[in-house]
Image (cartoon, helix red, strand yellow):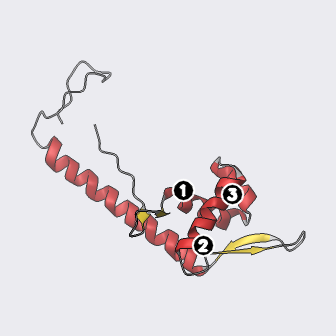
């Protein structure tokens, strides 16, 4: 058994500002240079990808995405600020996950039979 967490950033009115979906789309835009290609790789429609970008533009003062229009010179790039934001969020998410796993183990697993899982593949109960 293990714990699962999901981390995101909200503003003071609890509006979702930044999280896993926006991180994923920004990383894929950086990788592909295209919002369209990034949305395909993320398995989301183009409108949803644009929605992520618009929300970022609405809540974050710094420019994060630069859209270059034109047939031959088109494409999308991330600003250094966007790359920094993605890396900091990934670090934050990793550290929160690591803390959560350690704390879960301390509270539920250390020499306690706290939770019995009946859907395990083995006949033994799980010490949690």
Q: Secondary structure at mark 3?
A: helix
* Residue at image mark 1: 21
Q: Position of residue 70 (x, y in %)?
A: 87, 72
* Residue at image mark 2: 57
In front here: 127 or 60? Answer: 60
Give the residue displayed 73% in from the left and 70% down from the top.
76
Figure quadrant of residue 108: top left
Q: Is residue 112 above or below residue 33?
A: above
Give the residue displayed 65% in from the left and 54% down from the top.
48
Q: CA distance from mark 3 to mark 2?
A: 18 Å
> Which mark is nearer the camera, 3 or 2?
2
Figure quadrant of residue 90: bottom left
Q: CA distance from mark 1 to mark 3?
A: 12 Å
Q: Position of residue 52 (x, y in %)?
A: 60, 61
* Residue at image mark 3: 38
Left or right, residue 29 beside residue 84: right
Q: Is residue 87 above or below residue 81?
A: above
Q: Are marks 1 and 3 in contact (CB under 8 Å)?
A: no
Left or right, residue 51 beside residue 18: right
> Which residue appears farthest toward the left when viewing the image?
111
- Mark 1 or 3 closer to N-term? 1
Give the residue displayed 83% in from the left and 71% down from the top.
74
């Amino acid at each position: 058994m293990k714990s699962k967490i999901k981390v995101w950033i909200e503003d003071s009115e609890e509006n979702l500002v930044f999280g896993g979906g926006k991180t994923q789309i920004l990383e894929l835009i950086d990788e592909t240079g295209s919002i369209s290609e990034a949305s395909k790789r993320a398995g989301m429609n183009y409108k949803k990808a644009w929605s992520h970008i618009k929300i970022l533009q609405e809540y974050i003062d710094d420019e994060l995405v630069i859209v270059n229009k034109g047939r031959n010179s088109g494409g999308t790039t991330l600003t250094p600020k966007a790359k920094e934001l993605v890396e900091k969020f990934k670090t934050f998410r990793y550290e929160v996950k690591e803390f959560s796993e350690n704390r879960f183990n301390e509270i539920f697993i250390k020499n306690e039979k706290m939770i019995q899982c009946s859907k395990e593949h083995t006949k033994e109960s799980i010490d949690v």
